[in-house]
Amino acid sequence: MKKFALIIAAMLVMAPFNAIAADEESDFEVSHPFKENTTHWSLETSGVYLGLGVKHNWDAINNSFEAGVLNITSINYNSLHGQNLSLGVGIHHRSYSMKRPGMLMRDDNRVVFLSEYPSSNIDQIKDRTSNLNMGALQFPLMFRQRIYKKLEIGVAGIMNWNFNARVDNHYEMNKIDHDTHYKGLKQNKVNFDFMGTLAVGGTGVYCRYSPSKFFKEGFGPEVKQTWTIGLVLGL
């Protein structure tokens, strides 16, 4: 009788595992950006990108670049018929470089303003750079649509939490290097971007628009309306 009871108990314990093993169409799995989805729900890491700014609203900006991972992790729903909807969290970095001879400074009230290098003869200032840098956590809500075989288009709305902002200046004068760094800036902590993608097999191009102001009102120049284009891998 004891042996019979043990057999019944073993069958009851193993039944759920046998059901999972027999279910070849499980609706959830942990995936990665280079694996074709065969289930409706999955967790993924996706969207490593690098881009250059092509338009800025502030004339003092010489150029900008950005890099990041769109989704360090995301939860995805795949229709298995060409549509994919995802919500994730990623990391984003953007850097604005100033035109020469402009240099960003910060006063005691934490107001960032455009100044000039400390010399009446600008030719004495060598190797000069002045950058405004921002680091953010981003939360993209993205929809992708397959339009032909492995060709996909995508659109995303992205909420950014700008947890870090700083000014980094470097120049050489009279053969002496000078470096100044300003932290504790009054950036807007939350803003929103929009992104469009075109990719084949997970590799493609993207365009990103950042309409929101970088600084809080009265604490810096009106840096906004940045357009960026670049390459993206692993969508």
Image (spheres, helix red, strand yellow):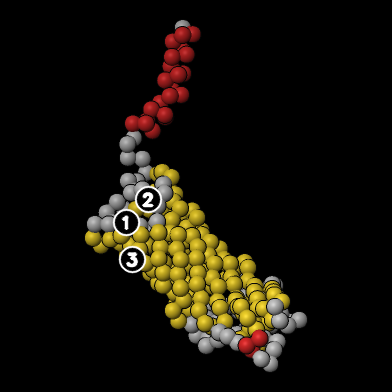
Residue 16's disc is: none
Dot 3 surroundings within 10 Å: few (below 14), some, or many (20 or more)?
many
Is there a contact, CB below 8 Å, between mark 3 and mark 1? no
Question: From the viewer's perspective, is residue 49 above or below residue 95?
Answer: above
Residue at 52% across, 88% down:
59
Residue 53 relative to residue 100: left or right: left
Kindly identify which residue carries mark 2: 34
Dot 1 surroundings within 10 Å: few (below 14), some, or many (20 or more)?
some
Relative image position of residue 27 (x, y in whole percent) = 37, 44
Q: Secondary structure at mark 2?
A: loop
Q: Quadrant of residue 22?
A: top left
Q: Quadrant of residue 23?
A: top left
> Which amino acid does the dot numbered 2 rest on?
Phe
Relative image position of residue 197 (x, y in whole percent) = 36, 66
Kindly identify which residue carries mark 1: 201
Residue 217 relative to residue 66: left or right: right
Q: Secondary structure at mark 3?
A: strand
Q: Is residue 187 at all visible to an observer of this figure?
A: yes
Q: Distance from label 3 to label 1 (Cα)? A: 10 Å
Comes first in the chain, label 1 or label 2? 2
Relative image position of residue 186 (x, y in whole percent) = 66, 76
Q: Distance from label 1 to label 2 (Cα)? A: 8 Å
Relative image position of residue 208 (x, y in whole percent) = 43, 72
Is there a contact, CB below 8 Å, between mark 1 and mark 2? no
Residue at 49% across, 8% down:
2
Kindly identify which residue carries mark 3: 198
Residue at 70% across, 78% down:
175
> Which amino acid does the dot numbered 1 rest on?
Gly
